[in-house]
Image: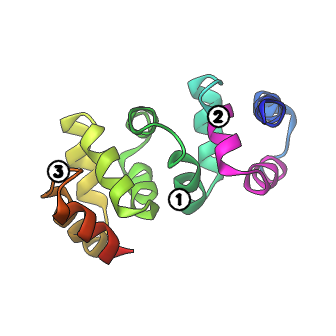
Amino acid sequence: MEEIKDEIKNIIESIENLDGEELRKIIIESHPYDVSSALIEVDEELRDKVLQLLSPSEAADILEYLDTEESADILEDMDSTKSSSIISEMEVDDAVDVINALDDDIKNEVIEHIDEDIKQDIIELSKYNDNEAGSIMTDILVQ
């Protein structure tokens, strides 16, 4: 497992030598967990380049494997429109957790750009604490 992560990390670090589509193909053919593990070990500039190559859905799949705080930190460094599109592709409960972990000024910008239907799901789930029955039931119903 560690070998795969290190291999992906080495590929990411050689981004300057790879065609963007070639790197994207390697990333999406790898397990999102392995990619997320490698991404947190590379510098912010490389991480941002990789995430820019991916669709919001592909980026969301990777970020969902990170701790909430790590995902929030990564998304805070991005343009709020790109962050919103990635959060919109996350599972609603993960999206709520990440949004709640964002700095308040960034949180408002990101929420402003989220699609209305998804925003309503996020707002509804945000009304409940993580372990309350309403949160659990909303999570089940939204899936």
Tell me, yes or no, whether the two marked residues, 1 and 2, touch with CB atoms within 8 Å. no
Which three-letter amino acid code belongs to the residue tagged 2? Ser
Percent position (x, y) of residue 139? 31, 67
Residue visible at 41% across and 43% down? 79
Residue bearing the label numbered 3: 129
- Neighbor class of circle 1 (other Cα within 10 Å; few <14, some 14-19, many 20+) is many
Counting residues from the start of the chain, the first of labels 3 and 2 encountered is: 2
- Neighbor class of circle 2 (other Cα within 10 Å; few <14, some 14-19, many 20+) is many
Residue visible at 65% across and 45% down? 33
Q: Which mark is residue 56?
A: 1
Q: Is 110 colored magenta in this rendering?
A: no
| Residue 110 shown left or right of residue 42 in the figure | left
Image quadrant holding the C terminus, namely: bottom left
Q: Secondary structure at mark 3?
A: loop
Residue visible at 43% across and 33% down? 77
Residue bearing the label numbered 2: 37
Give the farthest residue toward the left: 127
Which three-letter amino acid code belongs to the residue tagged 3? Asn
Tell me, yes or no, whether the two marked residues, 3 and 2, touch with CB atoms within 8 Å. no
* Residues shaded magenta: 21-38
